[in-house]
Image: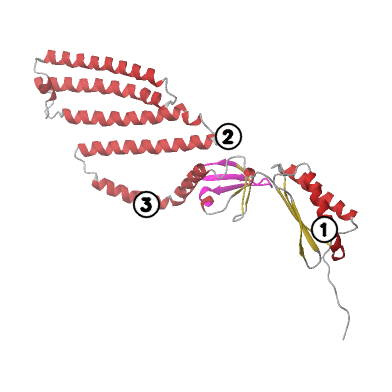
C-alpha cells in the first residue's frame, strides 16, 4: 500500500484532514478562476470548439478534485484506524483519472454534437440531414472506442488479462463482420455518397449500367430512395453506387439539341442553302446558348437520304423549357426545308423488276 497521506502530511489526523480540505477548496477556487479567464478568451475567438471544451471540462475537474480529496482523507483515516486492510490509494487515483478523462472526452463529443456547430457553415449543395446523421454515427463510434479503451485500461490495472479478451473480440468481430457484410457494405456506401457527393436529395439521377432513373427522395445509411417518372419508388442499396456509373442530370450546365435530319437525294443541291439558313436561324434564336456556337453541317449519305445535323446547347436546364426550344427549332427547320421546295426523306426500297 502506498501511504500517500503519510508521505504528504506528518501531523495529526485532524490537521491532515483540514489541510486536505483547504487544498481542495483552493484548487476549486483556482479551477474556477482559470475557467473564467479562458472562457473570456474563448468568446473572442472565431471558433466555438474552445467554448465546448471549456464547458465539458468544468464538471469532470470539479469531481476530480472532490474525489481525490475524499481519497486522501480516507487514506489518512485508514492510517490511523486501519478501516481497510488493503486500501490502494494509487489504484483509486488511477481509476478516477481514467474514468474522468473518458467522461471528459465523451462530454466534449456530446456537447459538440448538441451545439450543431457543424451545420453553421453549410454550402448550398449540402444536405443537412445527411451531415447530421454522419456526425451522429461518427460520434457514437468514437464514444464506444473511448469507453472500450477506458475499460481495458482499468481491467489491466486490476490484473485482468486482456490478451484473451482481445483474441475473443477479434474472432467475434470477424464473425460479426461476415454476418453483417452486406450491412457494412451499405454503410460504407452511404459514407461514400456523403463524402463524394455524387448527388443529393431532390436531384435527378440515372445510371446507364442499371435501370435507375428518377429523383432522389432520401439518402439513408443503408438505402437511397429514388422516385421514377412513372411515380414508382426504387429502394437502392448504397453499396450499388460503388460499382455503377451515375449521371447527375440536375448538375448539367446546359441541355443539348442533337438531331440528324435526312433530305431526299433529289434535294442534294439545295442542302448548302438550307444548312446556311438553319445556322443563321440558330445564331439569332432566343434560348440558344451562343457562347457554345451552334453547329449545323452536312453529315453523310445514308441509304435513303442525304443527312445534315443540328448540334446546339440551350440556356436552360429545365426539361419543359428545353422541349419547347427544341420544338421551335425543329418546326423552323421543317419550314426552311419547305421554303426551298425540299422534303424530308422517308426510308425507301428500290425493287428491280427487270428479268434477264
In depth, the one of 12 and 117 nearer the eye is 117
Q: Which residue is mark 3?
A: 175
**Sequence order check: which comes first, mark 2 or mark 1?**
2
In depth, the one of 306 and 321 nearer the eye is 306
Q: Which residue is mark 1?
A: 272
Q: Which residues are magenta?
A: 217-240
Q: Residues within 10 Å of mark 1 (few under 14, many from 20)?
A: few
Relative height, residue 216 to residue 20 (above, below): below
**Which numbered circle lies on residue 124?**
2
- Identify the secondary structure beneath mark 3: helix
Q: Quadrant of residue 309?
A: bottom right
Mark 3 to mark 1 CA distance (whole Å): 72 Å
Mark 3 to mark 2 CA distance (whole Å): 42 Å
* Dot 3 and dot 1 residues touching (CB under 8 Å): no
In depth, the one of 218 and 87 nearer the eye is 218
**Is residue 226 in the magenta section?**
yes
Q: Position of residue 116 (x, y in %)?
A: 47, 28
Identity of the residue drawn at 59% across and 40% down: 201
**Is residue 113 in the magenta section?**
no
Identity of the residue drawn at 13% across and 16% down: 16
* Total count of labels: 3
Amino acid at each position: 500500500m502506498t501511504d500517500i497521506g503519510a508521505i504528504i502530511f506528518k501531523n495529526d489526523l485532524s490537521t491532515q484532514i483540514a489541510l486536505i480540505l483547504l487544498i481542495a477548496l483552493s484548487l476549486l477556487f483556482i479551477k474556477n478562476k482559470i475557467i473564467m479567464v479562458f472562457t473570456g478568451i474563448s468568446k473572442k475567438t472565431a471558433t466555438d470548439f474552445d467554448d465546448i471544451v471549456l464547458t465539458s471540462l468544468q464538471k469532470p475537474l470539479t469531481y476530480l478534485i472532490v474525489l481525490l480529496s475524499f481519497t486522501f482523507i480516507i487514506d489518512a483515516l485508514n492510517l490511523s484506524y486501519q478501516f481497510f486492510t488493503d486500501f490502494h490509494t494509487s489504484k483509486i487515483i488511477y481509476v478516477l483519472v481514467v474514468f474522468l478523462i473518458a467522461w471528459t472526452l465523451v462530454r466534449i463529443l456530446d456537447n459538440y454534437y448538441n451545439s450543431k456547430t457543424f451545420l453553421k457553415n453549410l454550402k448550398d449543395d449540402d444536405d443537412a440531414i445527411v451531415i447530421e446523421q454522419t456526425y451522429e454515427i461518427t460520434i457514437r463510434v468514437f464514444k464506444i472506442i473511448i469507453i472500450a479503451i477506458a475499460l481495458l485500461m482499468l481491467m489491466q490495472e486490476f490484473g485482468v488479462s486482456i490478451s484473451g479478451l482481445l483474441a475473443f473480440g477479434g474472432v467475434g468481430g470477424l464473425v460479426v463482420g461476415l454476418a453483417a457484410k452486406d450491412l457494412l457494405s451499405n454503410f460504407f456506401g452511404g459514407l461514400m455518397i456523403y463524402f463524394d457527393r455524387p448527388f443529393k436529395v431532390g436531384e435527378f439521377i440515372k445510371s446507364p449500367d442499371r435501370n435507375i432513373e428518377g429523383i432522389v427522395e432520401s439518402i439513408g445509411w443503408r438505402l437511397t430512395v429514388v422516385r421514377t417518372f412513372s411515380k414508382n419508388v426504387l429502394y437502392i442499396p448504397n453499396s450499388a453506387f460503388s460499382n455503377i456509373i451515375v449521371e447527375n442530370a440536375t448538375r448539367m450546365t446546359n441541355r443539348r439539341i442533337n438531331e440528324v435530319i435526312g433530305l431526299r437525294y433529289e434535294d442534294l443541291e439545295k442542302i448548302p442553302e438550307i444548312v446556311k439558313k438553319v445556322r443563321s436561324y440558330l445564331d439569332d434564336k432566343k434560348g440558344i446558348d451562343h457562347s457554345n456556337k451552334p453547329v449545323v453541317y452536312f453529315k453523310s449519305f445514308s441509304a435513303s437520304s442525304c443527312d445534315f445535323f443540328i448540334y446546339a446547347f440551350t440556356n436552360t436546364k429545365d426539361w419543359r423549357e428545353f422541349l419547347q426550344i427544341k420544338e421551335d427549332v425543329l418546326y423552323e427547320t421543317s419550314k426552311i426545308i419547305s421554303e426551298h421546295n425540299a422534303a424530308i426523306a422517308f426510308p425507301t426500297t428500290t425493287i428491280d423488276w427487270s428479268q434477264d
